[in-house]
């Protein structure tokens, strides 16, 4: 009896560690601990579900299904196991099988939101758009802030040529998650289908803007982990400069502010690696747009001393020389 209690405590302790690791994205370490638990107890349902989830996140859907099947053998009425297996089958484009699994999940728990969404996706893929909409509505009754359900509903409405309703769905998804690229892209496609090319172009620009913001967030996270990551500083600066070129009109008060932030990123990258010709090229281009032509030329000269074939530095230098000569005249 004491041995069984001790084993249970040990399994529970490791499962808590797995949960923490999964939450912070350390899937490899979590997978090792799953294997450790399953060595102690091959029928630990929670460990099987965790392992299936980690494998699914790595797009190893067939392997994941194997672990969900083991969990189902142990507990056939767990709605999560059936829903997760259905999700993997959907990714494998086995839509009818996916529907079979999520129907089982919903039999045991009619409020399993993920199961309703997977069923909706599968029906969409089978061209059964009206049935799909009913599934998404069920999911949205459970959670009205499920952006994926709103997008799925929008996709179905678009295919039924109900464009205004589809746009409303994508707008809801964008409101919930303004940085969701799929939502912006979906709305743009609906506008194109409905003959509103001009509005679609505006949405496309917003979608592209969200991609830039997503990139900046990515580099910010890298820099939180390692503030000495020169490449991340350089690429963050490059992204900010790209935003300046694409999205800030000449009369925008933020133009100088964005350029100064990009310039600072290049300076930090060059403190870390003074021979980073890419950072020197980007810095030269930023200085050119700040109309600091002499500094731009100096920056490009440094890049060309390191790599005489650097096309970016050569091009920026030529433009800066032309601007500088014109100013002198």
Image: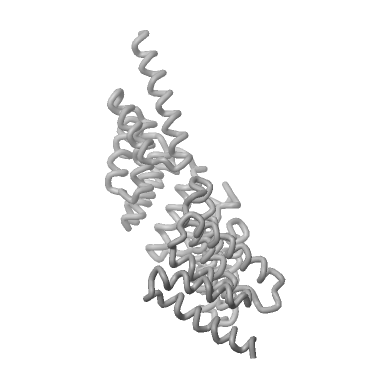
Q: Is residue 73 left or right of residue 203?
A: left
Q: Is residue 291 above or below residue 222?
A: below
User: What residue is at 67 percent from the left and 66 percent from the top?
Assistant: 257
Is 264 above or below relative to 197? above
What residue sits 64% from the left and 86% below the top? 327
Q: How is the image coloured?
A: one colour
x, y (%) of residue 26?
Answer: 41, 40
Quadrant in the picture for the C terminus? bottom right
**Viewer-side residue, 143 vs 242:** 242
Residue 27 lies left or right of residue 184; in this view the side is left
Q: Quadrant of the N terminus?
A: top left
Residue in the foreground of this view, choosing between 269 and 85: 269
- Marker count (numbered): 0
- Residue at the (50%, 60%) spot, across then down: 270
Q: Image quadrant of residue 42? A: top left
Rendered location of residue 125, percent (x, y): 39, 63
Q: Nearer the viewer, residue 97 or 212?
A: 212
Let me know if residue 203 appears in the view: no
Q: In the image shown, does 107 or 27 lie closer to the viewer?
A: 27
Percent coordinates x, y for residue 198 in the rendering = 58, 82
Q: Is residue 287 visible?
A: yes
Q: Residue at x 43, y 23 (%)?
A: 13
Residue 24: x %, y % from top left: 47, 40
15 w.r.t. 160: above or below: above
Looking at the image, the residue that sits furthest to the bottom is 329
């Amino acid at each position: 009896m004491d041995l069984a209690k001790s084993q249970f405590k040990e399994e529970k302790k490791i499962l808590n560690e797995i949960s923490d690791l999964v939450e912070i994205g350390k899937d490899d370490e979590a997978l090792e601990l799953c294997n450790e638990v399953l060595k102690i107890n091959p029928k630990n349902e929670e460990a099987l579900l965790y392992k299936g989830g980690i494998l699914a996140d790595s797009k190893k859907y067939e392997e994941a299904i194997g672990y969900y099947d083991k969990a189902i053998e142990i507990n056939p009425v767990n709605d999560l196991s059936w829903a997760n297996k259905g999700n993997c089958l959907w990714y494998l484009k086995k839509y009818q099988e996916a529907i079979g699994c999520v129907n089982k999940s919903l039999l045991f728990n009619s409020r399993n939101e993920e199961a309703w969404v997977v069923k909706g996706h599968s029906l969409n893929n089978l061209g059964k758009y009206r049935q799909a909409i009913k599934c998404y509505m069920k999911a949205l009754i459970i959670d009205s802030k499920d952006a994926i359900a709103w997008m799925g509903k929008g996709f179905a409405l678009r295919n039924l040529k109900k464009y205004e309703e589809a746009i409303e769905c994508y707008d809801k998804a964008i409101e919930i998650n303004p940085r969701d690229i799929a939502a912006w892209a979906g709305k743009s496609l609906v506008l194109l289908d409905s003959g509103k090319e001009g509005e679609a172009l505006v949405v496309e620009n917003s979608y592209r803007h969200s991609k830039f913001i997503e990139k900046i967030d990515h580099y910010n996270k890298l820099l939180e982990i390692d503030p000495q990551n020169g490449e991340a500083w350089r690429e963050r600066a490059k992204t900010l400069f790209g935003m300046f070129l694409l999205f800030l009109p000449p009369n925008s008060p933020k133009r100088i502010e964005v350029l100064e932030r990009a310039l600072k990123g290049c300076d930090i990258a060059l403190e870390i690696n003074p021979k980073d010709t890419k950072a020197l090229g980007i810095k030269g281009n930023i200085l050119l747009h700040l109309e600091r032509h002499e500094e731009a030329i100096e920056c490009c000269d440094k890049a060309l001393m390191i790599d005489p074939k650097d096309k970016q530095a050569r091009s920026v230098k030529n433009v800066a020389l032309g601007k500088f000569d014109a100013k002198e005249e």
